[in-house]
Image (cartoon, helix red, strand yellow):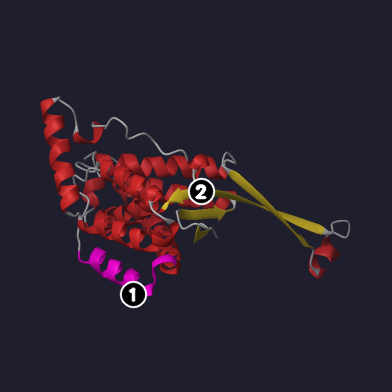
Amino acid sequence: MFTIKSTKQNLGIEISGSFEDLNELYDAISHLCGVDVKDFEGVQNRLYGFLYELRHTYQGNREIVITSRETGLNERRAYPDINLVQTVFYCNRILWTEILFVAFTLEDYKTMCLEDRKHFLTDDKTMKDIYEEYKRQSIKDIALVTYFQECIWNALKEVIGEIRVKSLKMLLSNKKMNYTGYCSQAIDFMNKRLVQSFIENRPKVIAELARNIIKKDAGYSELEASIKKFAIENNLFYYEVDFEGNEIIESDLLNW
């Protein structure tokens, strides 16, 4: 199974696993967020960005770690000429703000899948047997996505402490469909704040940013209002609005 842990400088998480494990996670998340849902376009685009990174991870385009171990007794009996077994792990690093947004918004997709599957049935002519098969698959996907979320929570607990994590979990559980119409451009600004923070202050900053992602502070409300106003004035969708100077942060240049 894949593993998730905080990076050395607590700038983000490191996810690693076999090709099969990461590919299975990719498929599960894709199944949940792969169908268009009204007012979730901005969230979906952000999740697609994570899926892009995840796919390139298990395809070997990020970091590869190869471990070796001596064969066990039963293995030596079956394969006497083989003394070492090698295992390949595929790794990648994701900023805390990005991965927390992914984990939190997946909660909304799980809610839609479990409580209101009509969101995912955009074609009224969908055959009943296909729909039933989808429901069976969705339960497996939700189980794996929930495990993925818990891995993130556990890694976060090592950085900000158990009390803060419990508080964030409670805050998130009190929200339903928290990210409808969310302007995910806010995460770009949070990324910059995280990257520019001092290492010794990073746990506190991460906890504050995590809370802001869930609760939408006054700064987010102001940003959302300006984005949606600009979108209307320029005949754009709100999730298409970009900001000058808000370039993508290059992972290779960061001190993880």
Residue that protrudes farthest toward the top in the picture:
234
Query: Dot 2, how many residues are within 10 Å of its Cα: few (below 14), some (14-19), or many (20+)?
Result: few
Left or right of 216, for residue 72 = right
Residue kind at label 1, given as amino acid type: Ile
x and y percentages locating residue 151 in the rendered image:
45, 63
SS type, badge 2:
loop
x and y percentages locating residue 78 in the rendered image:
83, 62
Q: Would you place residue 55 above or below residue 145 in this image?
A: above
Left or right of 113, for residue 201 = right
Task: Report the span colored magenta.
Answer: 159-174
Q: Quadrant of the N terminus?
A: bottom right
Q: Would you place residue 129 above or below residue 111 in this image?
A: above
Q: Which mark is on residue 203?
A: none
Q: Name the residue that disc number 1 marks.
A: 163
* Quarter assignment of residue 205: bottom left
Residue that protrudes farthest toward the bottom in the picture:
163
> Looking at the image, which residue is at 22% across and 43% down?
183
Q: Name the residue that disc number 2 marks.
A: 255
SS type, badge 1:
helix
The verdict on residue 168 being magenta is: yes
Q: Would you place residue 227 above or below residue 63 in this image?
A: above
**Residue 176 in sight here:** yes
Q: Nearest to the eye among marks 1 and 2: give it.
A: 2
* Quarter assignment of residue 49: top left
The verdict on residue 253 being magenta is: no
Nearest to N terminus: mark 1 or mark 2: 1
Left or right of 152, for residue 21 = right
Q: Would you place residue 15 above or below residue 38 in this image?
A: below
x and y percentages locating residue 170 in the rendered image:
26, 70
Query: Distance between the Cα atoms at labels 1 and 2?
Result: 27 Å
**Residue 34 in sight here:** no
